[in-house]
Image (spheres, rainbow, N blue to C red):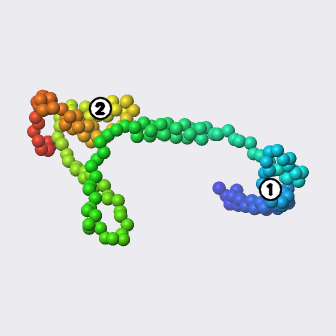
Amino acid sequence: MNDQSKKPVAAKPAAAPKPPKNLVPRTAPKAETQPPAATPAPEAPLPAPVATAAAAVKVKPVRKPTKVQETVAKHQKVLADALVKAQAIKYDQPKVMKPAPAATKKPGKAEKPPKAKKIKLVRDSYAMPEAEYARIGELKKRMVALGSEVKKSELLRGGIAVLAALNDAELKAVMGRIERIKTGRPSK
């Protein structure tokens, strides 16, 4: 290639900014500066100046709710119905700590409501046969099909609750069918 074939690229001239259009601000029509009068009884005719002021005010039409607003309203109704049903269920309330005796309270101090005792959670690990562990997954899938998602720990707690509800003979029969396994960590 020779030097003549290489021509320097000419820079494009920068486009000059367009001058702004002559904008003329719109002014709102001036409303009458009279204070609004209280509406008289329906039998009395309105005075002429008040009637013209009322005619000058535009009434906005009511807008149709959007799909999102309709969906939100529908879900709020469903949630309200579910809350009413849930509140109708009777169950045993957890026991609350007894309040401190009145003699230990200082006079003049505002009484604070007693705090509910927090339930202590315990972490543990268990060994179980693979077939029984696979059943946990099957039960979780069944619960999802029924419309309720559960965790593994919730399934185990539910099983304990069912076992606790059995009488002694039934409990012994069920536990007799459970295979004893060697405890401890499996060898690698």
Residue 21, visible in the rendered structure: no
Other-residue count near label 2 (Cα within 10 Å), few / some / many at <14 / 14–19 / ≥20: some
Q: Which residue is mark 2?
A: 139
Quadrant hosting residue 156: top left
Q: Nearer the viewer, residue 144 or 69?
A: 69
- Hey, what amino acid is under mark 1? Ala
Foreground: disc 1 or disc 2: 1
| Residue drawn at 14 percent across, 44 percent down | 185
- The residue that appears at 20% across and 34% down in the rendered structure is 165
Label 2: which secondary element:
helix
- For the residue pair 178 and 83, the one nearer the viewer reads as 83
SS of the residue under disc 1: loop
Quarter of the image that includes the C terminus: top left
Q: Quadrant of residue 117?
A: bottom left
* Sequence-first disc among 1 and 2: 1
| Relative to 87, 48 lies left or right | right
The answer to which image quadrant residue 67 occupies is: top right
Residue at 64% in and 39% down: 65
Q: Position of residue 125 (x, y in %)?
A: 19, 45
Counting from the top left corner in percent of width and height, residue 13 is at 76, 61
- Residue under numbered circle 1: 37
Q: Tag 2: residue type?
A: Leu
